[in-house]
Amino acid sequence: MAKTVVCGGGGFIGGHLVADLIRQGVDVRSVDVKPIDEWYQVFDKIDNRQLDLREKEACEEAVEGADIIYNLAADMGGMGFIENNRALCMLSVLINTHLCMAAKDAGVKRFFYASSACVYAADKQTDPNVTALKEEDAYPAMPEDGYGWEKLFSERMCRHFREDFGLTTRIARYHNVYGPNGTYDGGREKAPAAICRKVIEAKLSGNHEIEIWGDGHQTRSFMWIDDCVKGTQMIMNGDFVEPLNLGSSELVSINQLVDLVEDIAGVKLKRRYNLKAPKGVNGRNSDNTLIQKVFSWEPSTRLRDGLERTYAWIYEQMAPKSAKRFAFAQPVH
C-alpha cells in the first residue's frame, strides 16, 4: 500500500480526507502546524506529526518515504481573514515551494495541490448574476489579492515541476467547501458555517437578529465536504494534468443561504446588513463542463441537504456552551 501524506491533515478538509483514506485501508501520515490536540479530527494508530511546512527541513521530514502527497496546507480562512491578512496568505507559497522541492528529491509518485476559485480574474466576478467560471478564465491573471495570487503562483510551480522535473502533479480549484468538523467561529470560518453559527446564536439567545456582511445579493456556490473528498481523490488518481474546478454549480445568494438556514432552524430573523464588512466578489460559480467531460461526474449534493448536517453539528457544539453560560447567569437564591 502506497504511503500517503496529507499536509494540512489537522484542518477541515484535510481531516475529512484522512478519515476517508483510513476507511480505505491506506497507510496515512497526517501533518499540520497546529498542536495535535487542536486538530479538527485526530486519528489514533496513524503517523500524526506537528510540523511547520513553511520550513524546508520540515517538508523533507513530512515526505520521507512517501509515495503520494496531498498538499492542503495553507494559512487561510473565510473572506474576513483573507482580506485582512494578505501577507500571511502569501507566505503559504513557502509551503508549496518546499513541499515540491522535497517531493521531487524524495521521488514522490504523485503530488496534489489544493488551489482555489480565488485564482479567477476579479473582473469576471462583478455581477451577482455571474457567468460560471471556466478553467481558462484564470488568465489573463488578476486573482484575489494576496491569497489568490499565492494560489495561482503555486499552480504554476506545480506545472513547471511536472514539466521540468517529472513530478506528477494534479491541481483542483476548490469552490467554498463546507460541512461538519470545521471552523465556525473565531474569524476564519466561511459563509455557511458563519451563517449557521449566527442563526444558532440568535435562536439560543432569543435575540432574533442577524448581521449579514454586504448587501446579501452577492452569489456563491458551496460544495459539500464529501463531494470535495471524492473529487480530490478522483483528480489525484486521474490522467488530466491541468487545473480543474472542484465545486458545486448550485448558485445561491447570501440572502438565500440565510433563508435556508433559518428554515432548518425554524426561526425568522431581522437582518442587519453591514456594508463595510468584507464581502468578496459580487458573484462566483463553478462551470463544471470540464470535470464532467473528464470524469463524467461533478459535485452534486444539494445545498439544503449538506446544510442540515452542518447546522446539526454546529448546534451540538454550541448548545452545551450556551446552557452553561445561561446557568452561570442565573441569580443565586
Image (cartoon, rainbow, N blue to C red):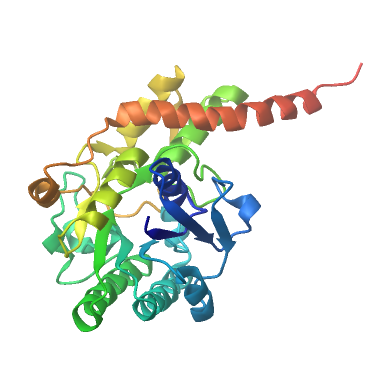
Q: Nearer the viewer, residue 110 or 31?
A: 110
Q: Nearer the viewer, residue 120 or 173?
A: 173
Q: Residue at x 49, y 26 (%)?
A: 312
To which quarter of the image does residue 169 belong? bottom left
Residue 159, can we see it? Answer: yes
To which quarter of the image does residue 72 belong? bottom left
Where, quadrant-wise, is the N terminus in this rendering?
Answer: bottom left
Q: Nearer the viewer, residue 63 or 91?
A: 63
Q: Position of residue 195 (x, y in %)?
A: 44, 36
Q: Nearer the viewer, residue 14 or 328?
A: 14
Up the image or down, 169 lies above or below 274; here it is below
* Residue furthest front in the image: 1
* Residue furthest bottom in the image: 164
Up the image or down, 252 lies above or below 93; here it is above
Q: Residue at x 44, y 32 (%)?
A: 310
* Residue furthest right in the image: 333
Q: Residue at x 52, y 53 (%)?
A: 10
Up the image or down, 113 lies above or below 229; here it is below
To which quarter of the image does residue 2 belong? bottom left
Q: Position of residue 153 (x, y in %)?
A: 29, 74
Total marks in image:
0
Where, quadrant-wise, is the C terminus in this rendering?
Answer: top right
Q: Position of residue 202 (x, y in %)?
A: 55, 27
Residue 131, can we see it? Answer: no
Q: Position of residue 49 (x, y in %)?
A: 57, 61
